[in-house]
Image (tube, rainbow, N blue to C red):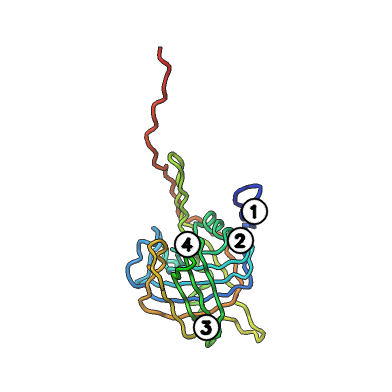
Amino acid sequence: MVIWKSTPLDSPLFEMDSDRGIEYWGCKAVMATFTVGGDVADLVPRGLHLDDPAFGAVLIADYGASTLGPYGEYVSILRVVDDDGTPGFYIPYIYVTNEAALAAGRELLGAPKKLAAVTVEVRPEAVVGTLSRPDDCTLARVVVAPAERLPGELFDALLPAGAPMYSLRHLPGPPGATQVHELIRWNCDLAIHADAFGDQQRFSGPASITYPSRSGVDPVHRLEVDTFLGGAYLEFDMRLTAGSVVWSESVVATCAEQPTPLTASV
C-alpha cells in the first residue's frame, strides 16, 4: 500500500491509501444534461475530442462524509472521446468547499479546483444546487423536482460505468525550473443508494439549469445550454481512484539572462 500525502510532510493537508483512492458516503447531488451552444473546443486538451454537437453536464453535490472530510462540489463536464475512440468525460471547471479536497484534486489529478460556496438543498418544491463565487454572486443554479425514478438504461447512458474522467495537470515553476503538463485519466465509481423497498434512489423530473451571473473570473457559463436534455437527483456513495498518465511533457520555465559573475581585477 502506498500512502499519498501532501505537504507539510509532518502535518499533511491530506493523505490517503493510493489503492482505495478517495472514498465518499452519504452523498446527494443534482445533475443537468444538455447539448452545448457555442464553440468550447479550446477548453479540451490535445488527445481528446468533443461530440458534434458537444454534450455537457453540470453536477452539484453535497458529500456528507469522505476520507477528505465533508464538502460540496460543483463540476462542469464535457463528453469526449480519445484518439482511439474511447468515450469519457473531461472536467474544464470544478469548485469545492474544502481545502483538502482542493489540494488533493489539483496535486494528484490536475483537477482545476477552486474554493467556492456550493450548496445542495432539499426543499419542498425541488432540490436546488447552487455555485457562488464570491458568496453573494450566484454563478450557476440547477433545480430538479424528483418526480419519478430515473430508468437504469437512461442513467447508464448519462454516466456509463467505467467511463474514464480526464484532467489536465499543469505544474508551473520558477524561472529555470521544469514545468510539467500531463493529461491524467482517472476513475469515478458510483454506488447508488437503495431505499427501504430496494429501489435505487435516482430520480428525474422537471428541471432547469441557469447561470444567473456571468463572471469573467469564473466563466462556467461557457458551457452554454443549447438543448436541455434533462435533470436528475441522486443519492449515492462514491470512490475516486487515479488511473494513468495519457501524455506528459516537460519544459524549462522561461528565465531572464543571468548576469556574468564579477571577477576580481588583476
Instruction: Pick the residue in front: 212 or 85.
Output: 212
Q: Amino acid at mark 4?
A: Tyr
Quadrant location, the N terminus: bottom right
Quadrant location, the C terminus: top left
Disc 3 element: loop
Alpha-carbon span between mark 3 and mark 1: 41 Å
Alpha-carbon span between mark 4 and mark 3: 31 Å
Mark 1, Cα crowd under 10 Å, few <14 / some 14-19 / many 20+, is few
Where is residue 181 drawn, in percent x and y?
44, 51
Mark 4, Cα crowd under 10 Å, few <14 / some 14-19 / many 20+, is many
Q: Amino acid at mark 2?
A: Gly
- First reached walking from the N terminus: tag 1 or tag 2: 1
Where is residue 39 drawn, in percent x and y?
32, 67
Res. 97 image quadrant: bottom right
Where is residue 107 drawn, in percent x and y?
53, 54
**Residue at the spot of label 3:** 126
Alpha-carbon span between mark 1 and mark 2: 10 Å
Mark linked to residue 3: 1
Disc 1 element: strand
Mark linked to residue 166: 4
**Residue at the spot of label 2:** 21
- First reached walking from the N terminus: tag 1 or tag 4: 1
Instruction: Pick the residue in front: 2 or 113.
Output: 113
Residue that sits furthest to the left in the current view: 38
